[in-house]
Image (cartoon, rainbow, N blue to C red):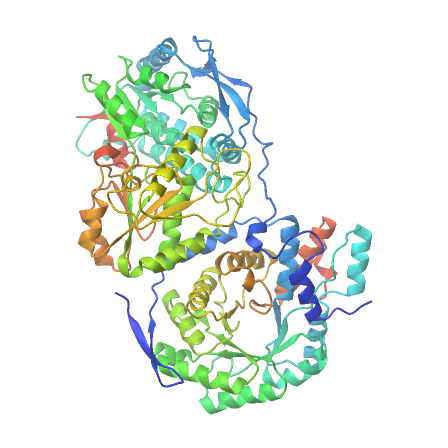
Amino acid sequence: MRDFINIKMPNGSEKPLPLVSVDKVGVTERANFFTTRSIKKDSKLWALYTAISMVDLTTLEGADTDDRVRQMCAKAIHPVSPYLFQEMCRQSGAAVEPIPSVAAVCVYPNRVKTAVAALKGTGIQVASVATGFPAGQVALDIKLQDVKQAVEAGASEIDMVIDRGAFHSGRYQDVFDEIVAIKTACGDAHLKVILETGELGSLEKVRFASDLAIQAGADFIKTSTGKIPSAASLPVTLVMLQAISDHYQATGRKVGMKPAGGIRTAKQAIHYLCMVSEVLGAEWMNPQMFRFGASVLLNDLLRQVYKQITGRYYYTKAFSLD
Amino acid sequence: MKTETAKQGRETMTKKSTGKNLDLSKEFHQHYAPSLESREIVKIAERYELFIGGRWVKPQTKEYFPTLNPATGEVLSQLARAGAADVDLAVKTARQAYTKVWSKTSGRDRSRYLFRIARLIQERSRELAVLETIDNGKPIKETRDVDLPLVAAHFFYNAGWADKLEYAFPGKKVAPLGVAAQVIPWNFPLLMAAWKIAPALATGNTVVLKAAETTSLTALALAEICAQAGLPDGVVNIITGAGETGAALVNHPDVNKVAFTGSTEVGKIIARAIAPTKKRLTLELGGKSAHMIFADAAIDQAVEGIINGIYFNQGHVCCAGSRLLVEESVADEVVRKLKKRMESIRVGNPLDKNTDIGAINSQGELEKIKKLVAIGKQEEGEFFEPASGTLPSKGYFHKPCFFNRVASSSTLNRVEIFGPVLTITTFRTPEEAISKANDTPYGLAAGIWSEKGSKIHQVASALKAGVVWANTYNKFDPTSPFGGYNESGFGREGGRHGLFPYLEVK
């Protein structure tokens, strides 16, 4: 028999949420399977371009300034100078498309205005972390205020953190209600719910937190804040993808996925893409449904694109740091 | 310079990608560009002789037969057909090597030879993996990540025992038996050779091994490695041929021990032939192993377990989890997830690193599988095979498939198919699961999926199966004994138990 936890839905009805069993050994084995996929040639180039278009370029420092954000936005629009890229292609006789822009930039609420201005007309989304990021240890009204301020400043995506304190205390209804309230405060902005999986302690809790967030209306679920050492991993992402898959099967609603932190190389990113493709399918293979929360990753993706086109590795200085 | 906006960029990405021809109307993973393991590392001779007494000996039959690459149908090489006279020579040579050299070689020295063989296998593992894939049809992913590491591990493990046999059976004296006649199957050619040869040598016996007719090349490569390791001539002799060669070998009056892995049908013939002799016998035969999924299992991982249980090695696994028993309350969910998962299985060129299921080993096996699938379709049961993926036009391939809602009495639930074909039956209680699992003439392996530890122990102890896996399947380790109940054979291979069939314990 399965265990359930009853959750009171926003419309007042009670919904039993199953506590889905997860076998860590099995998940790890399956996740490692994707690291043995060998992606070459056209498939690799396509994966690299796709991965670039899925990056949420992020700066979340106490020392962030408007100028720092503007520079990052420039990199978001053109990860590499279009002129230099075209020259490289011309020299190597390759006919490939321009490097795409990234999907979004992710900043603190106070920096949203700057980012919105810098990205006007580009189609690049501005995401803002909110809800007392990264700890989430502030009162709900402050969290809501945080969200409203970011949305009013023009953020089109909100990355919230769940209340891990409440979650560990077993106050699942509180976690749920908070996500529902924040989703309402988001208005038209998309809501990404950060589970901070490194603090949850087990894959079963990752699965349950995913189910809670999805039921509460999350548009995306996201692994980590990037502020603690244990960030995204393939096994954790796999468990979250399975929650998304089950929800899609049951309701037809597609929830997006964002692993964040710890994805630094193109090779890792391609493992994630193989996993998303084989677990969820083509409908998730785009920036509307899948994102990488990463910054260092971008330059490695570029480096591998150059390698695919020219057949040789460029030294890292060929790509600007930010 | 035109400025490309993110939106435009994204649209171009999803529509036509990088301008090269990658059709993204289908799934990315159906389009992984071929990633072929190079064949160049492998040198296959035009013809192979018999390996007897440390030399390559021409068969007295003067007959050769072709060995094929089942993925393409191309002839790889010609193998010698050993006749009765060749078998006699091989056994005599092994006897001489036993009497004059190997029985006088200390455990420590035997151990050194085995360690040397193990290291050589590791050094040549890529070559051996490619050769195995070409000769057998199994995907390179499996030969590289499963077969070869296990082959080396078996030699390493048994090397460790060679000088410690006194401790394996405390308070007893042990002695080798003499000459071991070993006949191996085609599903794990090199691994089965390792399972047979490593413990035999560690315990001080000499060996005449007959490789399977369709998959002898890696066993012959192992012969080469034995020579390379400086193993005394005649300690390991490897001969090739079909059923008659095997029969001549096991019936040779001067062998002390017969070890056979293969079909139950042949196993019974051997058992009858051996019965009036003093030869010792171990048989590792077929199976129809039950794989049980309880409602409290981790379902997503259990689905992976099912896939690994039945589609690993094209289902050519004696302990394959070929009978799926699912608790009725989760049966629909399991079947739905299984179907979805099967759509992402890649069947194709075994040398492609992204291939999950390779070629069926021979035309005969493929026909047998097809015949049984046809019978299944005539009987009750809902047939399913994935819509995705097309089979290569050449070679012997079969899609993974299953029959849902199959009664225990149906043909497919009784016979060993030895291919990528699963049957699914439901149960209601643990007692019913146990009774259904044991309702078979076989008894090689079983799998249990449940998150409840006490249930796993209760069910496992009631199963008549040589190996029981809990929350996993098809895991092999040289330290763990392997073998069957009833028509799955007798005797154990691997672990301390695996030494016993090669020793006189006094």
In this rendering, position of residue A89 left or right of residue B35: right
Residue A165 quadrant: bottom left
Query: Where residue B129 sits: x, y (%)?
Result: 50, 35
Identity of the residue drawn at 56% across and 67% down:
A290
Seen from the viewer's position, the closer of residues B340 and A131 is: B340
Seen from the viewer's position, the closer of residues B405 and A99 is: B405
In this rendering, position of residue B71 left or right of residue B200: right
Identity of the residue drawn at 67% across and 66% down:
B11
Query: Where residue B318 sits: x, y (%)?
Result: 33, 37
Residue B9 quadrant: bottom right
- Quadrant of the frame with the C terminus of chain A: bottom right
In this rendering, position of residue A201 left or right of residue A54: left
Looking at the image, residue A315 lies above or below residue B494: below
Looking at the image, residue A224 lies above or below residue A299: below
Query: Where residue B333 sits: x, y (%)?
Result: 35, 60
Residue A115 quadrant: bottom right
Looking at the image, residue A133 lies above or below residue B400: below
